[in-house]
Image (spheres, rainbow, N blue to C red):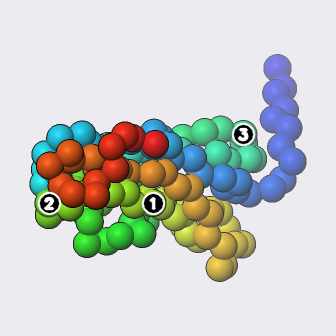
Amino acid sequence: MLVFALSCGHPRALQSVTVSPTSAGLIGSSNDGSIQYTAYGHFIHPVETVDISKDVTWSSSAPGFVTISDGLVTHIGDSCGGTLITAAAGKGVVGPGTSNVVVTGTALFTVIDASVPGCPTALP
């Protein structure tokens, strides 16, 4: 028996990144706590969605507000507010032949603490 596998001949390519949850936060004491985010890569050739959390570069729009390690976002200090969390997939994840391509996904991280004046009163 002869079996043929059809392929379009294109290399695996990352089309988009989704970060889950899209919005999360901590309520209460603003000086401790963590939220685990997951970065999902949506690929073509073949079409698949996989966890790429350990393969992306994580960052925050307020780096003094949180630390991030493999998607685990930990609030530091005793401030409140929000920050945009970004998962950026570069050349090694995106696919061959994509020299300067970066694909990103984002999510929101918020800390609410009623004891801190001016702090938000609800999660987005």
Mark 3 vs 2, N-terminal side: 3
Q: What label sits on residue 47 in the rendered view? A: 3
53 vs 44, nearest the viewer: 53
Q: Which residue is mark 2?
A: 78
The tag earlier along the polypeptide, 2 or 1, is: 2
Please state which of the two labelled residues, at mark 3 or mark 2, is closer to the viewer. 2
Q: Residue at x 46, y 42 (%)?
A: 124
The Cα atoms of the two marked residues, 2 and 1, are separated by: 18 Å
User: Spatial distance from mark 3 to mark 2, Cα to Cα?
Assistant: 44 Å
Which quarter of the figure is the N terminus placed in?
top right
Judge from the rendering whether residue 16 lies leftward or rightward of residue 27; answer left or right: right
Query: Does the image show residue 83?
Result: yes
> Can you see residue 73?
no
- Give 2 or 91, whichever is nearer the viewer: 91
Q: Residues within 10 Å of mark 3 (few under 14, many from 20)?
A: few
Q: Which residue is mark 1?
A: 84
Q: Are marks 3 and 2 in contact (CB under 8 Å)?
A: no
